[in-house]
Image (cartoon, helix red, strand yellow):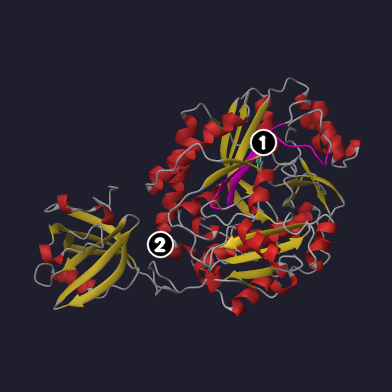
Amino acid sequence: MRTSMRTHACGELRESHDGEQVALCGWVAHRRDHGGVTFIDLRDREGVVQVVFHPSEAPDAHAAAQRLGAEDVVRVTGVVRARPAGMINAALPTGAVEVTAAGLEILAEAETPPFQIEDFTEANEMLRLKYRYLDLRRPEMTKRLRLRHDVSRITRDHLDARGFVEVETPILTRSTPEGARDFLVPSRLSNGSFYALPQSPQQLKQLLMVAGQDRYYQIVRCFRDEDLRADRQFEFTQLDIEMSFIQEEDIVELIEPLMVRLLKELRGVDVAAPFPRLTYAEMMERFGSDKPDLRYGMELVDLGGVFAATGFNAFSGVLGSGGRIKALCAPGGGQLSRKELDGLVQDTKGRGAAGLVWMVVEQNELRSPVAKFLSAEELEAIVDHTNAKVGDLILIVADKADRVAVALDGLRRSLAVRLGLIPSDTWAFCWQTDPPLFEWSEEESKWVSVHHLFTAPKDPENLDPATATARGYDLVLNGFELGGGSIRIHQAEVQRRVCEILGLEPAEIDEKFGHLIEALRYGAPPHGGVAFGWDRVVMLLADQEAITEVIAFPKTQSGADPLTGAPAPVSDRQLRDLGIRLSEQPKAP
Ligand code: ASP
């Protein structure tokens, strides 16, 4: 870290530097005046070191040091001294030494910052983002930026060693469908026409395969105009990968060792590979989710058989209309209060299910508001099927299959937290395989792609939207989807047929995807790929719950950047150049 202004970084000094003359540059983290001596903690990106100013040894420097304020930028010259045994600060990596100052130069004075530059901060998000350059000075933020760099560095190394070439693709491009709204950029040269910012480089990476480039990757910014939330920003980063002449297995063989290496090198954790693989159908049946958290049990149990001939109308009605009755058993959940149980019922209704039946397993009975409507055999069979023990809580949802899944998945996740069932520092990866190719969208009243429309069907002869399976896969970690991909369609006719099933008119297919379909006619290799939500991967490795904690300059929930003031109105002149006239006054974000 030597430069023409310093010999070392502050955080770099250790006992081995004892006696060395050093010059350090950094920010004043704290100043203390003690028995006539002035101490400052000097901070730079690498850490903090204590500097001592003695009035007798360096009177000028000592006098200047007494006037230092927090966040002033200084250059200190002096000598490194090992601290006596009793004075070592074990909490600080530099705690075995201090620097006795001979000279002090003030490089820049700082105004009092709006919040203290310390790991624990009470500053709210707005303030942290408005003064992000101060927020990023906090050691934990500095550490996260470094972690993010390390994740990408290890990944680049892994991919480079396997023959992958990083290729940049344009930001100004044409819409590629990933299911979100596009960000549009008006064209100045062709007024009335727009570029779309890429939701992903999907078509371009496929074209690179047609171009014979064989193994592509890119750590790339993608843009989706969707409502922001804890793990979603307008612009986010993907690790984007595409390979030729492969099958699903090749993706697994590429990615598993990468994940194992990231965990080992960045967290010191050994993760076992191969990761479990579960089909989409199995995930939905056992967990009610296509991204199950496998760190704990509470698998869903089908109670359809138990209630096949039930006299309880609520249940027989659901079975009669083709619905499902499923349950989960929360170990130790019997401790929840009546109020908490009522809260679970409300949550379940909030997730769209008709209701929730709870049963607490007691010594000689099942305590439940519906127990009186069920026969002794049914009650016994419920305990039997769910494998419940005294003190457990059984939760039953009866409704349409998809609502049952959503409700029980939500209950499973929230109870795992509430009952403390999640083991710490556990990294449960799994692959989801064999998803459906299409799903029916109630909202749009048509079939839509589950992944995207370039995904190959398992059987090119079966494109029946109700039954076709896709050659897709997702990687799931601790209940989060880290990423997903698929083997692609590489035959022009199949691509066209899939477009038709999705309800695209021939002219629309030509207009939107003509270039890709044409490329597939010029010799397209079988190919496939995958993309990972890089912010999310770093977030999990950093033990964070929001991706904004691992992005240098994120936006607020309303999509604003309090630091620069974006988005902002533009001048009439700029609008004129773009051929745009506003129909309303600009709105504040
Ligand atoms: N482009 C896809 C996505 O962004 C990933 C892939 O299929 O490779 O989700």
Let me know if residue 513 is in the magenta part. no
Query: Decide: marks 1, 2 in contact (CB < 8 A)?
Result: no
Residue beneath label 2, please?
137
Q: What is the total number of numbered labels drawn onto the structure image?
A: 2
Name the residue rendered at 60%, 25% in the picture: 214
Asked if ligand 1 lies within 8 A of label 1, the reply is yes
Q: Is residue 305 above or below residue 118?
A: above
Q: Report crowding for label 1: few under 14, some 14 to 19, many 20 or more residues within 10 A (C-alpha).
A: many
Between residue 358 and residue 362, name the one nearer to us: 362
Between residue 319 and residue 231, name the one nearer to us: 319
Q: Report crowding for label 2: few under 14, some 14 to 19, many 20 or more residues within 10 A (C-alpha).
A: some
Specify the quadrant of the image occupied by residue 470.
top right
Q: Position of residue 340 (x, y in %)?
A: 60, 76
Between residue 235 and residue 368, name the one nearer to us: 368
Q: Position of residue 113 (x, y in %)?
A: 41, 73
Q: Quadrant of the C terminus?
A: bottom right
Which of labels 1 and 2 is toward the front? Answer: 1
> Which badge, 1 or 2, comes first in the chain's sequence?
2
Specify the quadrant of the image occupied by residue 496.
top right
Query: In the image, is 204 to the left or to the right of 164?
Result: right
Where does ligand 1 appear, by image quarter? top right
Q: Amino acid at mark 2?
A: Arg
Q: Position of residue 27 (x, y in %)?
A: 32, 64
Task: Give the CA distance from mark 1 to mark 2.
Answer: 40 Å
Query: Disc 2 on helix, strand or loop?
Result: loop
Q: Look at the image and give the residue range highlighted in magenta.
A: 465-488
Q: Is residue 51 above or below residue 338?
A: above
Q: Is residue 503 above or below residue 358?
A: above
Residue beneath label 1, please?
486
Q: Amino acid at mark 1?
A: Ser
Between residue 151 and residue 578, name the one nearer to us: 151
